[in-house]
Amino acid sequence: MKKAPRAKGKPKLTKFLTEHAIGASVIIKIDSSQQKALPHRRFHGKIGKVVEVRGRGYVVSVAQGNSMRELIVRTEHLEPYKGT
């Protein structure tokens, strides 16, 4: 979970201000400089759907095997999914 040398340090302000709509698809990308509401590393790179907003974070539904998991993840660890 290391960062590239030029990406080290605090994340940009736009990472904190990004809002995700309910039902939107997001990619879970762990930012190791922020430890609050950090998802487990097995979910890094997974695509999920935003189910609800809870406090400063989002509840994201992710498939794991044959079941669906709900994770509470802050916006620093999420990116919008632009795929199909």
Image (spheres, grey):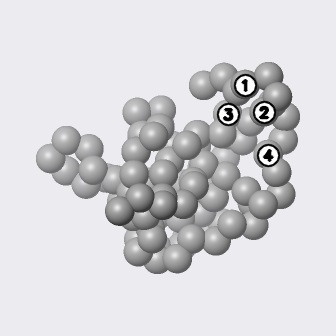
Q: Name the residue under label 4.
A: 11
Q: Which residue lies furthest to the left in this view?
A: 66
SS class of the residue under badge 1?
loop
Give the foreground label among 1 and 4. 1
| CA–CA distance in space, label 1 to label 4 | 13 Å
Type of amino acid at the residue the image marks with label 1? Ala
Give the foreground label among 2 and 4. 2
Type of amino acid at the residue the image marks with label 3? Ser
Q: Mark 1 points at which residue?
A: 4
Pointer 2 and pointer 3: residues touching (CB < 8 Å)?
Answer: no
Pointer 2 and pointer 4: residues touching (CB < 8 Å)?
Answer: no
Q: Name the residue under label 3.
A: 32
Pointer 2 and pointer 1: residues touching (CB < 8 Å)?
Answer: yes
| 82 lies left or right of 33 | left
Q: Name the residue under label 2.
A: 7
SS class of the residue under badge 4?
loop
Type of amino acid at the residue the image marks with label 2? Ala
SS class of the residue under badge 3?
loop
| CA–CA distance in space, label 2 to label 1 | 5 Å
